[in-house]
Amino acid sequence: MTRFLLKGLIRDHHRSLFPVIIVTAGVMTSILGYCFMHGIIDDMVRSNAKLDTGHVKVMTRAYGDISRQLPNDLAILNVGDLIGDLEGDYPHMEWTARIKFGGLIDLPDEHGETRSQGPSFGIALDLLGPNSRERDRLGLKKALVRGHLPQAPGEILISEEFANRLGADMGDLATLVSSTAHGGMAVQNFTIVGSVRFGIAPMDRNAIIANLSDVQYALDMEDSAGEVLGFFPNLIYDDKIAKKTARDFNSKIHQPEDEFSPVMLTLREQGGLGEYLDTVNSRVAIILFGFFFVMSLVLWNAGLMSGIRRYGEMGVRLAIGESKGHVYRSLLGESILIGTVGSILGTAIGLGFSYYLQEVGLDISSMTKGSNMLMANIMRAKITPASYYIGFLPGLLATLVGSAISGIRIFKRQTAQLFKELEV
Amino acid sequence: MNNGALITAENLVKQYPIGGRKFTALNDVNLTVQKGEFLGLVGPSGSGKTTLLNIIGALDYPTSGSAIVIGTDTKELSHRESARLRNEHLGFIFQTYNLLPVYTVFENVEFPLLLLGMDTEDRKKAVMGILDRVGLADRAASRPSQLSGGESQRVAVARAMVKKPKVVLADEPTANLDAENSHNVLQMMAKLNEEFQSTFIFATHDEKVIGYLRRKITLNDGRVAEDIETTPQYN
C-alpha cells in the first residue's frame, strides 16, 4: 500500500515536485539568510574585538567618555602594574596594552624636504614581545601586502592604500608628527617595513601600526597606555564570563568618584555594540520567523489546492473502502515525505551557497569606502552547527501543518458529499 | 424484513437541511433486494436515486428508518466499519469513471485488493483475470488518459468487480458513453452478474440501461412509485 501511494506521489508532480520545490526554496533561502546574517554579525564582533574593543577593555572613565577623540592625556598610568594585577586576578584572559593615536605622516625626499604627507590613524601594540599574541590577533601576517612585519624598534606597518597615496616604498623613512600626552609636540621617525590590507575600510584608508614602546616613547607615555584589552585565548567572545570579569574588576578597582580610576567594559558595552547586535539579531529572528510563516501559508495553500484538486481521488478511495483515517494519515505521510525531501535538498543547497559565501564572500568595498564602521569589505556567511538544522524543522513542520489543516477539511466532510463531488 | 434478503430498506427517510428548511430526498422507502438481482432505481433528477444508492453504499446515513446491507444496519456503523463494509462487499461504478489518473489500468484495478491486504501473486492473478474478462488485458500498462470513454468505463467495471463484491452500485454508468459503448459495457455487466452472482443496482434514467434490467424500481419525489419485474430487452 505504501509503495502504491508512493508511486502516485512521485508521478503526480502537483503533489510532489511543486511542494518539494517550495519547501526546498524556502529552506534554502532561510539557511542562506541565517548563515549570511550570522557571518556578518560574527565578522563585525571579531573585527571590533581585535581592532578596537577587545573582549573587555580597561581605560580610565574620563578616557572612555571621549575615547573617539583619542585622549591620551587621560590614559592609564602604571600600566605594567595594572597588567600584572589583571594577569594575576583574571588568568582566563590575555591582557595587552594599546595606544590609539592620530597624527601626520610625513615622507621626506633625499634632501629632507616633504615629499608627501597625510593624516593618519595609528594603533600601537606589542609587536616585538616574545610572548605577544598581538600579531596573530590582528592577523598581520595574512594582511601583509608588501615587505615584512616589524622586527626591530622603530619599524612600522602602513596600510597599502595609504602607502600608495603617499607614494611610500618599503624601507622609506616616515616622520610621525603628533602631540604628546602632556600636550607638547611629538616628532618621531620610523621606517616603513611593510604594508597591510585588512579589508576594513577605516583601517585601510590611513592606518599605521607601530610597536607599543616606540609610541610610548614618542608620545611621552612611558608605562602608560590608553587602553588595556583583555581577550579570551580562543578569541571567541563569551558575554557571560566577560560580564562577570568586568563586574568583579569594577567592584574591586573602580572608584566612581575618580574619573581617572580604571573601569572595565565588555565588548557589548562599548560604542552601543550590544544594542546594535541585539537589534540585528532580533531583526534576523523576525525576518526568519516571517519567512517561515509565509512559507507555512504557501504550503498550507498548496495543501488546500491539492486537497481540492484531489477531492475526486479521495471520494474514489473512500468509496472503494479506504477509511477516512487512512486517507488522512496517508496525506500526512505524504507531507512528511515532501517536507523531509524538501528540507534535505533545501539544507544541502542552502549550505552549498553559504559555503560559497563563506569562502568567497560578497565584495561591498565600493559601499564602505567612506565608512568608519569596523566592518569587513567582504561580507561572508558563516556556517554554524545550527545551520544544519535551522531550516529543517520549520520546512518539515510547515509542510505537515499545512497538510494537516487542509486535510481536516476533507476528513470532516461528509463521505456522501465527497462522493457527490466525484460527479463534478 | 425479508429473510435471506441481501439489502432491506425499511421506512427509510432522508432529509437535508436547505436554507433553514428540510428537503426530503427519501420518504418512507421500503424495499428488499435479493442476491444476484440486476435492478435499477429509475426516475427523474431529484427523485432520490443517488441518495438511496449512497445509503445502500454506506456513504450516507438515513435520517430515520433503516438500511440493512448484507446483514448490517448501516446506521449503526462507524466510519471505519462503513469503510470495511464497502471494502469487503461493495463495488462502485461512477458516471465519470473516476479512475485515478496517475496510476496505470493495472494499478487502478489493483487498488481495492491492496486495501483487502491480498498478497502480490494473488493480486496480479485477480487483476489480470478481470482485465481479461473486460477485454483490456493488453492495456494493463496504459494510463487512463490513454483510454477511450468505453475503455475507461470497462476499467471502472473491472475495478468494481475484481474483488467479486456481493453488491455493485452503478450511478448513471452510461451517461458519458455513446450507444455502442453503452451496450458493450451493459452486456459485460450483465454477463458478470450472471457469472459472479453479484447484485447490480443502477441509478439511471437511461433507456438503454433500463432495457437490460430485470427489476425496475421507480422513484418519484423520494417515494417508491413502482417496483416491478421486467424482461430484459437486450441480451
Image: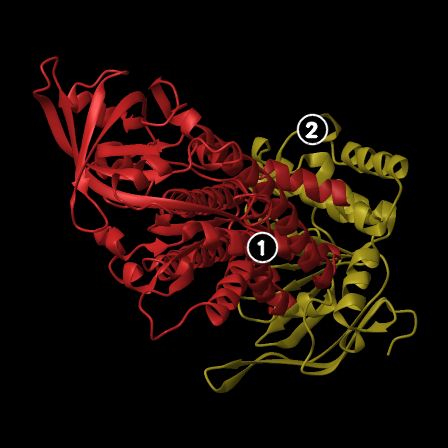
Q: Residue at x 92, y 74 (%)?
A: B3
**Residue behind mark 2:** B141
Q: Residue at x 28, y 27 (%)?
A: A158
Mark 2 or 1: in front is 1
Q: Is residue A337 above or below residue B5?
A: above
**Residue behind mark 1:** A88
Residue A276: assigned label: none
Amino acid at pointer 1: Gly
Query: Which lettered chain is shown in red?
Result: A
Q: CA distance from mark 2 to mark 1?
A: 83 Å
Same chain check for tags 2 and 1:
no
Q: What SS does tag 1 mark?
A: helix
Quadrant where the C terminus of chain B is found in the figure: top right
Q: Position of residue A191 (x, y in %)?
A: 27, 22
Determine crowd level at label 2: few under 14, some 14-19, many 20+ residues with C-alpha closer than 10 A.
few
Horizontal side of B71 relative to B174 (left or right) equals right
Between residue B205 and residue A136, name the one nearer to us. A136
Q: Is residue A408 above or below residue A81?
A: below
Query: Which lettered chain is shown in yellow?
Result: B
Q: Is residue A124 above or below residue A175?
A: below
Q: Is residue A242 above or below residue A23?
A: below
